[in-house]
Image: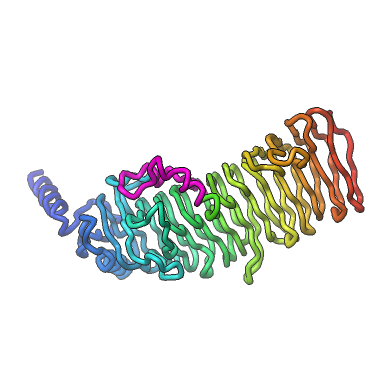
Amino acid sequence: MKFKLSILILCSIIFFSSEAFCTDDPLITTSVLNHGALADGKTDCTKAFQQALDFTAGKGGGIAAVPAGRYLFKGSLVFPPGVTLKGVWESMHHADIGRGSQLFVIGGKGEEEGQPFITLQQSSCLKGVTIFYPEQNVDDIQPYPWTIRGRGMFCSVVDVTLVNPYRGIDFGTESNELHVIRNVFGCPLREGIYINRTTDIGRVENVHFNPHSWARADYSNKPIEGQWDKFLKYLSENLVGFRIGKTDWEYMVNCFVIFPKIGFHFIHTKNGDPNVVLTQCGSDIGPVAVRVDASQSHAGLAFSNCQMMSQVIVSESNRGPVKFSNCGFWGIPTTDHHAQIGGRGAVIFTSCHFQGWARVDPNAPAILAHGGTLIVNGCEFIDDQKRHITLEEDVQSAAVFGSHFTGGAKIENRSKGKVEIGINIE
């Protein structure tokens, strides 16, 4: 008993001297403190962290631990395959500057296309840390490289708060499969998550992008009351929450962004088009909640139990199906249409409700279809005395049935295609 007590006391002394780290956790291979990292917020810890990662890889993989404290970085880190960098946060957390494992990044300022702060490789993971850019300026927002980039299979980002990154997580620039992004909070300034070149199912779960993640950081550069409106204007003109290109069977659950220019943007890249299933996701208080420029022609996009504020745009370039089931649509002061539909794919609304459109143009319909196929089934249009649906000439076909239109259905049909309207409640 005396021997064990002595060992514990010795480990505590070494730990608090920041010269080494002692743990009885058999999963932890080493600590960044053992490789020269200092949690003083002043010393560049790039080299020490990289040595800890490389040491862990040399032991066959495992965990490099990051004890609570503030660590400064002027450079970038590359995770070897099979290595986890793990801070003390065991769950989702807000921007708790002053608590937990905090990574302060000052390198890369002004270099948008520079080396990401962290590059993950096969089966590597970043877990339980807060990443913060202390030199970012609300009044003069500067570009930085991506905070995290994934390369290869099974890259994971778990229980991580990205307080104020210019661009957050990049699983699109390099080929990747089976990525996991889970329990990620923060306030990205230009782009939250980019997915592309994903040839097997990726998973994005419990992601929450909100400017309060920066505003509540106890640090001098956070947005203060006099800057708030200017900051929200910047986000509404610049931020894309989720940008998604080529991916097969991407699963997205509980993903949310507020005040974006575009909440969810689905695009064509030279690698292909997206195929995504989204459940309980939402985009709040922005001019465009969803923009679909492309989706896979055989599978497309499926939204279930989602909430959109404000509109959906399906552009002329889209060829795949886009389906909304049990979703809600609300307007903001600039909202005219809840959906503008073009392209050659089918857009389907089932068991959805629409409220608060025609805010600028009183004659604007909730759904304006320029082309493609439209199916509206079992939906409710709540606003009274407003136009509900307009079908323009190039609409190939449409079916509107089994829905409720407050104040009587106001459907304008100019389509030259086959259109069926009936069994609706007025």
Q: For this rendering, which residue is in front, 62 or 198?
A: 198
- Image position, residue 353 (x, y; %): 71, 35
Residue 58 lies, with reference to residue 166, above or below; the image says below
Q: Position of residue 383 (x, y in %)?
A: 73, 31
Q: Is residue 401 above or below residue 128?
A: above
Please give left or right for residue 425 compared with residue 24 in the image: right
Q: Is residue 246 above or below residue 409?
A: below
Q: Is residue 220 magenta?
A: yes
Q: Is residue 293 visible?
A: yes
Say how the picture is coloured. Answer: rainbow
Residue 60 or residue 127, whichever sits in front: 127
Asked whether, in this view, residue 83 is left or right of residue 294, the answer is left
Quadrant location of the N terminus in the rendered image: top left
Residue 66, quarter of picture: bottom left
Residue 179, x across and y down, in percent: 51, 59
**What residue is shown at x 45% (from left), y 67% (from top)?**
112
Residue for point 41% across, 60% down: 142
Is 174 a magenta residue?
A: no
How many marks the image carries: the answer is 0
Quarter placement of the C terminus:
top right
Residue nearer the viewer, 36 or 6: 36
Kindly tell me whether residue 306 is visible in this rendering.
no
**Residue pictured at 69% horizontal, 59% vertical:** 295
77 over 164 or under it: above or below = below
**Residue stretch in magenta:** 205-234
Q: Residue at x 89, y 36 (%)?
A: 422
221 sits left or right of 285 in the view: left
Rendered location of residue 90, percent (x, y)? 36, 46
